[in-house]
Image (tube, rainbow, N blue to C red):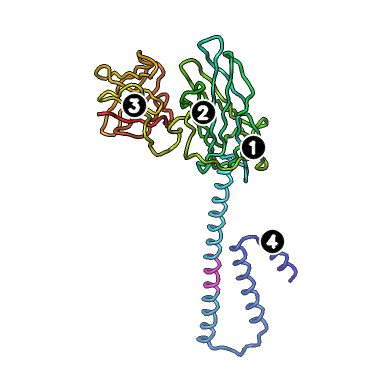
Amino acid sequence: MDKIFDVATSISTPLALGGFLAAVVFWIFRQIIAKDIFPRLTESLGADVIKHIVDRLFILALVATVLGISAYVFVIVIQKDDNSRKQASSSDGVPPGRLLSAAPFRARLDDCTDKTCDVVLRLKGYDSQGRLRYDSKDEFSKWIQGDSRDTRLNTTDTLYFDADQKVHFQLFCGLEGENLRVGEGSDLGWSARFESSTPGVFYWLSCAHDHFKASIGIAVAPATSRINQPEVKDDSSPPQADVQAASRPAVAEPVPTSSRQAASGSFSTGNGDSFVQAAPGVWHELSPQKTDPSFIFEETKRTDTELLLFDKSRSLYLRLPIPTGIAQWRVGDSGSWNYWYAATYHK
């Protein structure tokens, strides 16, 4: 009897359990029959008893087999799904509950047409829900090309987001007293470098002007708690010196009138520039302060709703809406589209 319990402790699968129970039942029946306590049976009755025993044992074995196979398949499927989840988690490399922070850390003057440049930079930061939380402006006097400076933009204000979210920063630049130009904007999110021995990724957003090109560095790194996150700000009415539309989805606004009379078939934009067709397939971007074109574009596509231009010197594409809307630009064939100024087509 002890040997039977020893065997029972070594059973580890449902199929083995079914076989063990069948053997136990068979052994019990055999012991009962061996007691010789039953009356003598006729050949017919004896055959019926044996037939019933065989039938019951067959049914029991069949049930045990079905249950064993079902349990085996179920375990295989569960293990495969669990392994898939583990592999996916390992490939993503994102720790559960990962929190990230993003904040500007330095300003840099990349180019300057004079010995020194006076530069105005403005940086806006939007949280994962598209709400304005960061908005800071700074002025740099007698800035030398190649020089990096700490700035009021480098405050303790920080944007926070989860690993499956992104925040957006948009840079503007210009001279004091003029409308700021739209620079680069970028969606910042999780990177595998955050899980390395030296976590942290630095992004640079640049903004080009006629007289200079400047950049702001954004540091993104893992965080443990939300500290110094600014409150949501009102972004419905940008300051007068700012652009008419930031580089994120917005409703088209009226274009300010320029000192230059808009020509028929031309476009005017929110910064005061105009786009005039100089020849078939050739467009000039004209600034209010200049008579010569600032940039020359090739017409690549035209529909009833937009005009697509290409500036070969900067590898820059420009979408101008027809009749009115928000112009968009991108660098290269695969770059992401960025919102520029409000634009209107003049028939």
Sequence-first disc among 3 and 1: 1
Sequence-first disc among 3 and 4: 4
> Does residue 2 lie above or below 141 as drawn?
below
Q: Marks 3 and 2: which is nearer the front?
A: 3
Sequence-first disc among 1 and 4: 4
Identify the main secondary structure in magenta. helix
Q: Position of residue 257 (x, y in %)?
A: 36, 28
Hey, what amino acid is under mark 4? Ser
Element at label 4: loop
**Residue identified by numbered label 1:** 222
Q: CA distance from mark 1 to mark 4?
A: 49 Å
Hey, what amino acid is under mark 3? Ser
Residue 11 lies in quadrant: bottom right
Q: Position of residue 197 (x, y in %)?
A: 68, 31
Sequence-first disc among 4 and 2: 4
In the picture provided, is 147 more to the left or to the right than 4? left
> Does residue 29 lie above or below 246 as drawn?
below
**Residue identified by numbered label 2:** 171
**Residue identified by numbered label 3:** 268
Name the one closer to the observer, 55 or 9: 9
| Rendered-image quadrant of the C terminus | top left
Q: CA distance from mark 3 to mark 4?
A: 85 Å
In the picture provided, is 194 more to the left or to the right than 42? right
